[in-house]
Each structure stands twice: as C-alpha cells, then as structure tokens.
Image (cartoon, grey):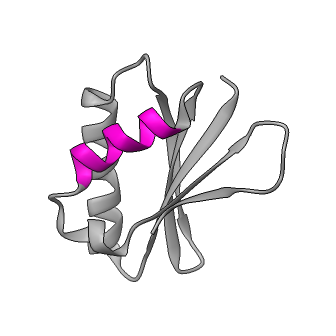
Amino acid sequence: MSFLLVLQWPARSEVDYDELIAMEDLLLEQLPEAHGVVDGHDFGSGEMNIFVYTERPMEAFEDVMTLLSSRSRWSDARAAYRPIDAEEFVILWP
C-alpha cells in the first residue's frame, strides 16, 4: 500500500476507547478491501486514531465517511493521509 490514512478524534475517557473499538470493528467489517486495509488503532495523549493503508486515499476516506458519519463522534473527526515514505500529511477533514 502506498498511503496511510489516519482518522483521529479527541479522547477523554474509557467510553471514548469503547467507541474507537466499535468504529474500528465497523471499518474492518465494511470498508471495501479495494479501497483500504484497516491496520489498527492507538489511544493516548488525549487522542485516538485508526490507521488505514490504501492505494486510494480519497476513495477510502469517502467510504469511511459513509460508514461513520452517522455516529455521534463523527463531528469531532479529523482525517489526513500521506505517502508511506513521506512525513507531511494532506488534510482531508475538516
């Protein structure tokens, strides 16, 4: 995979962690493999992230938005991607 898509939210509590796991599970089940592969999450320092490796960051993000936009945490979401071998991210959302 050529790109890393990172989905990020503020994290304040164990409830946030539970929501992170629920969102990750949903993406694992429903994100089309042709657009991305969910590769885990992290939680700490006031934020939580889900990582998606993809060849098509825009299509992967569109799928993610479709799958997660009805969840209560979507309004806090941030998303960015970068080539695997780069350090600077391209902001997708908001």
The quadrant of the image that shows the N terminus is: top right
User: For the magenta stretch, what is the residue range?
Assistant: 58-68
- At horizontal 54% and vertical 29% (from top left) the residue drawn is 56
Side of 62 where 90 appears, left or right = right
- At horizontal 32% and vertical 37% (from top left) the residue drawn is 63
Q: Is residue 60 magenta?
A: yes
- At horizontal 25% and vertical 52% (from top left) the residue drawn is 68
Q: Is residue 57 magenta?
A: no
Q: Quadrant of residue 2?
A: top right
Q: Is residue 47 visible?
A: yes
Pinpoint residue 79: horizontal percent, then vertical percent. 50, 58
Q: Main secondary structure of the magenta part?
A: helix
Q: Quadrant of residue 13?
A: bottom left
Pinpoint residue 78: horizontal percent, then vertical percent. 47, 66
- At horizontal 25% and vertical 29% (from top left) the residue drawn is 30
From the viewer's perspective, is residue 23 above or below residue 11? above
Q: Nearer the viewer, residue 74 or 38?
A: 74
Count the marks: 0
Pinpoint residue 90: horizontal percent, then vertical percent. 66, 55
